[in-house]
Amino acid sequence: FHEDVKARGVLIVVEGLDRAGKTVQCQLLLEALQQRGHHVKYIKFPGNTTMKVCLGWVLKHACSDRNSLTGKIINGYLQGQAQQDDHSIHLLFSANRWEAAQRIRSDLSNGITIIVDRYSYSGAVYSAAKENPDLSLEWAWQPEVGLPRPDLLLFLSISAEETAKRGGYGEERYETNAMQSKVRHLFDRLLSMNHGHDIHLIDARFPVDQVAKDILNSTLGHLSERKPLETFAKLR
Ligand code: Z5A
């Protein structure tokens, strides 16, 4: 491999249902990797205007796209303040990732490892879960084709029933048991279609510290990978 490929950072995506513990785990992984001397950044999708406070940790690491045009529209939609056609909002979520894609590429090539809290997988399954007959999982995946493909996908595996026990759902439009169950089913389907992908299923039912250890173990083996960055392909 060329020298620039050797030096690049690693793209790590953390996915899962609402309340699976993604943000808590991203924080812990960020800290663990930084303590080991890695240069690491955190990005959350959708990048929007909501500041999420998690165990007292304000997401100061979140990328500047939080205030992007798409981020603002998406935030209003998620809060129920604005209606959008299913296809239109889907494409805006995808555009929100495309807005960040060049930055992700350039950070990786500068040796920065990036931890991403939700990505294209959430994008496809939340839209397909609406069961709009014209919005299949395959249709929903299509705008993601060409985006940077993660080197490692950590899927926090837990059922909708178990996440519901972690506290009442809030005001966002997708926070219902029925929606989360459909989302879980679609995540399973999507992950099974992404052949050749490095996916680690992490049992997210365990206490936070145990989950963090499993995630770190899964991640450490990948930090020495130096293959060229790939992009998402069509679903097979
Ligand atoms: N969406 C979409 O439609 N299209 C897209 O392209 C994208 C997203 C990217 C974003 O909501 C919504 O947008 C989301 C998908 C959709 N749908 N919904 N609903 P958001 O930004 O508000 O949601 P989020 O930030 O991603 O948060 P979350 O999913 O609700 O939570 P989380 O990050 O997975 O969990 P957490 O904040 O780390 O922890 C949640 C609680 O559980 C907290 O009280 C923790 O203390 C507790 N917790 C965490 N881990 C544990 C363990 N191991 N045991 C016990 N308790 C735990």
Image (cartoon, rainbow, N blue to C red):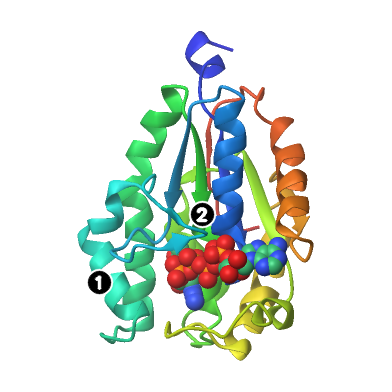
Report the residue marked by disc 2.
117
**Residue 19 appears in the figure:** no
Query: What amino acid type should be assigned to the residue bearing mark 1?
Result: Ile
Residue 81 in percent (x, y) is at: 26, 85
Q: Who is closer to the viewer here, 109 or 176?
A: 176
Mark 2 Cβ and ligand 1 under 8 Å apart: yes
- State which image quarter holds ligand 1: bottom right
Helix, strand or loop status at disc 2: strand
Residue 213 in percent (x, y) is at: 75, 44
Query: What amino acid type should be assigned to the residue bearing mark 2?
Result: Asp
**In the image, what residue occupies the spot 33% across and 86% down?**
80
Sequence-wise first label, 2 or 1:
1
Q: Who is closer to the viewer here, 127 or 168?
A: 168
Residue 55 in percent (x, y) is at: 52, 59
Residues under labels 2 and 1: Cα distance? 19 Å
**In the image, what residue occupies the spot 28% across and 48% down?**
64
Residue 133: which numbered mark, if any? Answer: none
